[in-house]
Image: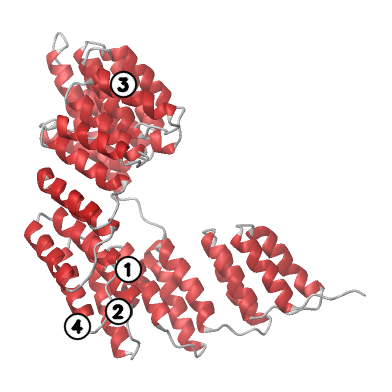
């Protein structure tokens, strides 16, 4: 006897496929439904929209909204929330705003999920004042903010350098009886330390303890990192002991922060002791730990020890990141082993994205080559840098300006060299990089040629697409 699948059967299969990331197969199953005389319901569409959203295929997800209505299936608040959340995560606030309008037209009332998505999107875009206004609108609409709402706002304020405002919001949150989780506290602690407000950070820590909040590894790590940024690694050692006594095992990030703190204050011996303690505690070092140790050792001229750590890292199956590679290259260049450093650099080019050279890596090698009078090789490396997609920065320009003035006979002021560099970047549509070089030229009283000026102005004044302008207007009107 043949058993015909019903909408529930199809929904289960579609959900499973989407969960596995097999969205295209899920779409095929969805299309089969009409062939089996089985009409998809709201849950079917929501599941597929969510799957497409997670694959960053928002255009297809939004098209399903029109399709479902044509087929006589009316969207619910959940349907709109799935799409609004996807668009906000992508940063497309204009289309998200249009969907909210559409939501009202369809008789669906925005709920806390809708508002949380919009607030998160605004925070991602750095539009904190508009996010606060939307929060006020949320409250006036009798929609109660929850821990997610406040947590998103606090994190957004911290990222914008407004940790003090975030602390005020946390206080307001507690007064209203909301539970503050460890991530909100850790975000605020990190933000206050980063802004140089260590007293406020320590006050927050004490208040947290007084309120009966037991610190976990996330909170301890935030405190340790903050104190190390303040140049107080010795105080951190006490915190680490307290952490262990309270039955909280330090993670590799806590150890890495402490190592970095000791290296920054010039106490490499204590940094190495921390490494030994970490290994002794059975914590498995990750790429970050190795990078911190290699960087610190190279900075104090302990290249032999850094090389041993490098070998150990590779033997453990840890892939060096750009910081580890750049540190080794810097150490080798400082010891005069430029050719070995170049071998490391060439090795980087064949590694994964996290190990690709950045402008810092290039500047280290450019400085070394110019110092050893290998100017033609330095120019070749600069060409490779541009071809690789890295734009020269102020340091890059200063290296070549200094070299052209001090190493050439007769000396050159570097105007022609930088002018050509601007044109090369503009030909590759790298306007930001070209603007940086022009800025360096002007600071050094080296005005670009008239033709170069014309090209720069032309690129900077190119009209934007009409759609982008309309979307920006929509975003400003709604948000």
Does dot 1 land on a helix, a strand or a loop? helix
Q: Which residue is mark 1?
A: 122
Task: Give the quadrant of residue 452.
Answer: top left
In the rendering, at what x and y percent does residue 220 appear? 23, 56
Cβ atoms under marks 1 and 4 closer than 8 Å: no
How far apart in space, not on screen, are marks 3 and 2 (Cα)?
54 Å
In the rendering, at what x and y percent does residue 69 appear? 63, 81
Looking at the image, residue 126 lies above or below residue 148 = above
* Label 4, residues with CA under 10 Å away: few <14, some 14-19, many ≥20: few
How far apart in space, not on screen, are marks 4 and 2 (Cα)?
20 Å
How far apart in space, not on screen, are marks 1 and 4 (Cα)?
25 Å
* Label 1, residues with CA under 10 Å away: few <14, some 14-19, many ≥20: many
Of residues 233 and 279, the one nearer the viewer is 279
> Which residue corresponds to the image point at 70% horizontal and 67% vertical from the top-left?
13
Query: Disc 1 vs disc 4: which is toward the camera?
Result: 4
Outermost residue on the right side: it is: 1
Q: Which residue is mark 4?
A: 175
Q: Which residue is mark 2?
A: 134
How far apart in space, not on screen, are marks 2 and 1 (Cα)?
9 Å
């Amino acid at each position: 006897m043949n058993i015909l699948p019903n909408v529930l059967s199809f929904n289960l299969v579609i959900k499973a496929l989407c969960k596995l990331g097999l969205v295209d197969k899920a779409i095929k199953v969805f299309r089969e439904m009409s062939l089996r005389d089985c009409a998809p319901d709201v849950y079917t569409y929501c599941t597929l929209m969510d799957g497409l959203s997670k694959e960053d295929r928002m255009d297809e997800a939004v098209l399903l909204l029109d399709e479902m209505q044509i087929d006589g299936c009316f969207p619910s608040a959940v349907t709109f929330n799935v799409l609004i959340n996807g668009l906000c995560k992508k940063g497309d606030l204009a289309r998200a705003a249009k969907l909210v309008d559409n939501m009202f037209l369809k008789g669906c009332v925005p709920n806390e999920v809708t508002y949380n998505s919009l607030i998160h999107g605004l925070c991602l875009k750095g539009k904190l004042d508009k996010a606060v206004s939307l929060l006020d609108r949320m409250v006036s609409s009798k929609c109660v903010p929850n821990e997610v709402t406040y947590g998103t706002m606090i994190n957004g304020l911290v990222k914008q350098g407004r940790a003090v405002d975030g602390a005020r919001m946390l206080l307001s949150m507690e007064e209203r009886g909301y539970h503050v989780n460890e991530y909100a506290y850790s975000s605020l602690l990190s933000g206050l330390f980063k802004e140089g407000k260590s007293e406020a950070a320590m006050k927050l820590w004490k208040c947290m303890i007084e309120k009966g909040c037991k610190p976990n590894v996330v909170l301890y790590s935030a405190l340790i990192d903050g104190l190390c940024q303040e140049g107080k690694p010795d105080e951190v050692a006490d915190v680490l002991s307290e952490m262990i006594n309270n039955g909280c095992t330090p993670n590799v990030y806590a150890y890495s922060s402490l190592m970095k703190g000791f290296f920054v204050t010039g106490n490499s011996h204590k940094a190495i002791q921390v490494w030994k303690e970490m290994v002794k505690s059975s914590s498995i070092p990750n790429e970050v730990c190795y990078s911190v140790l290699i960087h610190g050792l190279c900075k104090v001229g302990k290249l032999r020890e850094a090389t041993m750590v490098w070998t150990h890292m590779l033997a453990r199956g840890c892939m060096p990141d750009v910081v580890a590679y750049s540190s080794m290259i810097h150490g080798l260049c400082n010891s005069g082993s430029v050719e070995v450093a170049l071998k490391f650099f060439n090795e980087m080019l064949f590694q994964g994205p996290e190990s690709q050279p950045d402008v810092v890596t290039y500047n280290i090698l450019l400085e070394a080559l110019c110092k050893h009078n290998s100017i033609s090789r330095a120019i070749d490396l600069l060409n490779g840098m541009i071809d690789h997609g890295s734009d020269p920065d102020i340091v890059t320009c200063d290296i070549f300006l200094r070299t052209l003035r001090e190493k050439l006979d007769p000396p050159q002021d570097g105007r022609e060299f930088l002018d050509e560099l601007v044109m090369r970047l503009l030909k590759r549509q790298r306007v930001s990089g070209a603007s940086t070089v022009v800025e360096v030229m002007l600071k050094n009283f080296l005005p670009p040629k008239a033709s170069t000026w014309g090209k720069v102005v032309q690129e900077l004044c190119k009209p934007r697409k009409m759609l982008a302008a309309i979307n920006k207007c929509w975003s400003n009107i709604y948000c």
